[in-house]
Image (cartoon, rainbow, N blue to C red):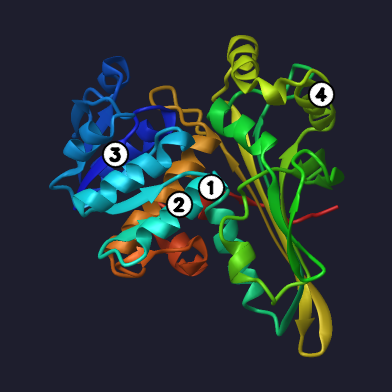
Amino acid sequence: MRITLLGAGHIGHTIAHLLSHSGDYEVTVVDRSPEALAKLAGMPVQTRVVETSDAQALLGALRGQQAVINALPYHLATLAATAAREAGCHYFDLTEDVAATRAIKQLAEGANTAFMPQCGLAPGFIGIVAHHLAQGFDSLQEVKMRVGALPAFPTNSLKYNLTWSVDGLINEYCHPCEAIRGGKNIEVLPLEGLEHFSLDGTEYEAFNTSGGLGTLCETLAGKVQTLDYKSVRYPGHQALMKMLLEELQLNQDTETLKDIMRKSIPSTMQDVVLVFVTVSGMKKGALVQEVFARKIFAERSETHPLSAIQITTAAGICAAVDLFREGKLPQKGFIRQEEVALPDFLANRFGAAYQQSRQVESIG
């Protein structure tokens, strides 16, 4: 399968490695940065320097390809999807941006190709898990989805290191969040809904962030009383972010905040991804709760280290593309994450990264 991968950053690099070494994909990696592309040297991929914010240049790069994987910043998602539609190739991305997903859904209407956004961790894998658990109930009461990409060794006041896109992080901290309360679809504020819990002997906090639910609010509309998504952090993070965004009003100057974070908060490859889903409802006349809890750790290889967020995000989108290639997903139109069967995902050669993680047995 001929694929163009847009973006040669940390996640793009991992996607390129997985697909190009699988034997089933001819991968061309496109990026505006020759330096980023140079880091792919030695991989069995082709590279092209293209100004990825230029619609015509993007279209030229996609012509003749069967599919495109978009690993560019979220604000380029609609542009890339539009180019994919015009070029006649299938489209997959990692966006968590709600507005971009709605625009892509419109682009998919009447298309002869497939459009599958939100193929990462959250949205992405978390929605596949939640939908799978929900299907086992006669009626649903509550679906809670919690995800954290956290440093393994927090040392600063925020108890946080940069493990993925700063653009994406601030985007999810600043935009309204979808939820279902009392059976009705509503919007809730980001950074609100603070809760605390312990998992595997570690204390965490969680709070509302935007985008993680994907399309589940639509899929479960009228079927569940409560549905929400929250990001998991170590205790104290939310209070400091509220101070920065609200009291210092950096939510009105996010470029300054991003610049501060890039300069002041170190990135780390030593991270852990926490996935925690609880679903409650009626089964055979009894109120039952089911839990899915996993921790995925970084690979500390001397030659090819991978962060947990790289592993989980790349595995998510590579598994989606692979299942599509195998005919296990619709072949045209808009594809929701919850159309992926969890057993198929975990059995997939790429999705197995989640299967090899550590299942958490004790929930407190």
- The residues bearing labels 1 and 2 have C-alpha atoms spaced at a distance of 6 Å
SS at mark 2? helix
Which badge, 2 or 3, is on the more N-terminal residue?
3
> In screen coordinates, is 152 left or right of 163?
right
Disc 1 and disc 3 in contact, CB within 8 angstroms: no
Report the disc number at residue 5. Answer: 3
Q: Which residue is mark 1?
A: 99
Q: Is residue 317 above or below residue 345?
A: above
Q: Image quadrant of residue 157?
A: top right
Q: Residues within 10 Å of mark 1 (few under 14, many from 20)?
A: some
**Outermost residue to the top:** 263
- Residue occupying image coordinates x 83% and y 21%: 247
- The residues bearing labels 1 and 3 have C-alpha atoms spaced at a distance of 22 Å
Disc 1 and disc 2 in contact, CB within 8 angstroms: yes
Q: Which residue is mark 2?
A: 103
- Residue occupying image coordinates x 60% and y 24%: 162
> In screen coordinates, is 117 left or right of 111?
right
Q: Residues within 10 Å of mark 4 (few under 14, many from 20)?
A: few
Disc 4 and disc 3 in contact, CB within 8 angstroms: no
SS at mark 4? helix
Location of residue 76 in the rendering, given as x and y in whole percent from the top left corner: 41, 36
Q: Is residue 311 visible?
A: yes
Q: Which residue is mark 4?
A: 240
- The residues bearing labels 4 and 2 have C-alpha atoms spaced at a distance of 33 Å
Which badge, 1 or 4, is on the more N-terminal residue?
1
